[in-house]
Amino acid sequence: MSELRQRPGREADGQQDSEGKESELESKLDGETASDSECKSEVAQAAPADDTPEVLNRALSNLSSRWKNWWVRGILTLAMIFFFFIIIYLGPMVLMMIVMCVQIKCFQEIITIGYNVYHSYDLPWFRTLSWYFLLCVNYFFYGETVTDYFFTLVQREEPLRILSKYHRFISFALYLTGFCMFVLSLVKKHYRLQFYMFGWTHVTLLIVVTQSHLIIHNLFEGMIWFIVPISCVICNDIMAYMFGFFFGRTPLIKLSYAMSGCTYFVCPVEFNNDTNRFTVDCEPSELFQLQEYSVPPVLQSVLSWKTIRMYPFQIHSTALSTFASLIGPFGGFFASGFKRAFKIKDFASTIPGHGGIMDRFDCQYLMATFVNVYIASFIRGPNPSKLIQQLLTLRPDQQLSIFNTLKAHLLDKGVLLGPEDA
């Protein structure tokens, strides 16, 4: 009887052992080992270090943790806003460099999370290839931007002209080199995990690099397309955080009104051949000139106005602020879901009280994509200056052919008078 009683226990033990082996086998097939699970738990359970400067810690030592966090975030927010004003004053080229630095830091934060989660595998060439692909993608995007916006400068310099002519082939060759390096680095035991990391890198490039490049495109259309969208997201984030403490509102419509009348903000970035410098000086387009609009009859009795004078850009700024308030936060929700998936509070601890750079730019990237699409759909039209620059680089016979074609077209439209009409 005792043997009979012991058999079920032995069978249960054997069943547990087999289930344990099966689960271990499944874990191995999924690219995870016990050491990897321990590494993940260490990453998930690691308590965030106090990154608050010692000066602030001493000054705010008598406050509760809730109010201490509020003051730390507030002081650092004001510091970042002050820094934002400084880089705006320094001009669009400095802004472009800042965007590139932010992009690199965001990429580093996301890649570091992947590396920390799977650190026990010691994947060969993972970090090197990740940064190499970042270099390739930036070379491609910035090369395209320079060729598109500064065509005259590129054609004037022989090295730049050669690089521009074969830019896409060089970009493809660089990426193909990285692709071959990745294939050669594959290790038999870690195939699946290495492809996970290959996908991790490329999705990070898609989210961070591509969208930060769109920010630079918006910047070259005029700094107002950079400042207003970013300000909308910043104010939305600040009000969302402070709503539990205070109530307030920020008059963004006045901000757009003030900038619309200044050429420094509304003019696109161009290269001046005479001074050999990048300039932001132009005759503002109709978008940034005061227009008179009729007030709808329903509102005339309420406002006692029949017409109102405003910049057309103020109407567009309504669409930008609406997107920043309703859809922009979904970029933050996406980032929050990502952090919860790996049980981390912030992407990094770069900014005390705020987390990493990516924590502050999660909504900005989605906003930049919308602004770029909005400009392409409703704002941007043919650019005569770019067209003339390209025509001047053609051979004389090609220029003459285009001239005759354009002349015949204008004669048919009646814009030019023919010899018989003179």
Image: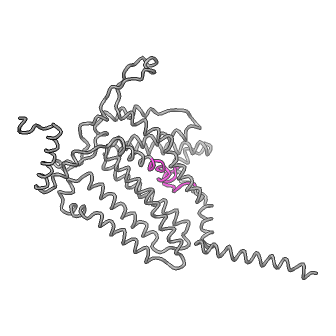
Q: Nearer the viewer, residue 415 or 298?
A: 415
Q: Nearer the viewer, residue 79 or 99?
A: 99
* Image location (x, y in percent) of residue 418: 9, 39
Q: Quadrant of the C terminus?
A: top left
Identify which residue is drawn at 40% across, 74% down.
180
Q: Quadrant of residue 265?
A: top left
Identify which residue is drawn at 48% across, 45% down.
76
Position of residue 28 relative to residue 276, above or below, is: below
Q: Quadrant of the N terminus?
A: bottom right
Identify which residue is drawn at 27% across, 36% down.
284
Q: Quadrant of residue 5?
A: bottom right
Identify which residue is drawn at 31% across, 47% down.
220
Q: Nearer the viewer, residue 192 or 254?
A: 192
Q: Residue furthest bottom?
A: 3
Q: Nearer the viewer, residue 282 or 39?
A: 282
* Image location (x, y in percent) of residue 345: 57, 54
* Image location (x, y in percent) of residue 401: 13, 52
Give the side of residue 365 with respect to residue 43, left or right. left
* Image location (x, y in percent) of residue 144: 30, 57
Highlighted magenta segment, given as a residue range: 345-366
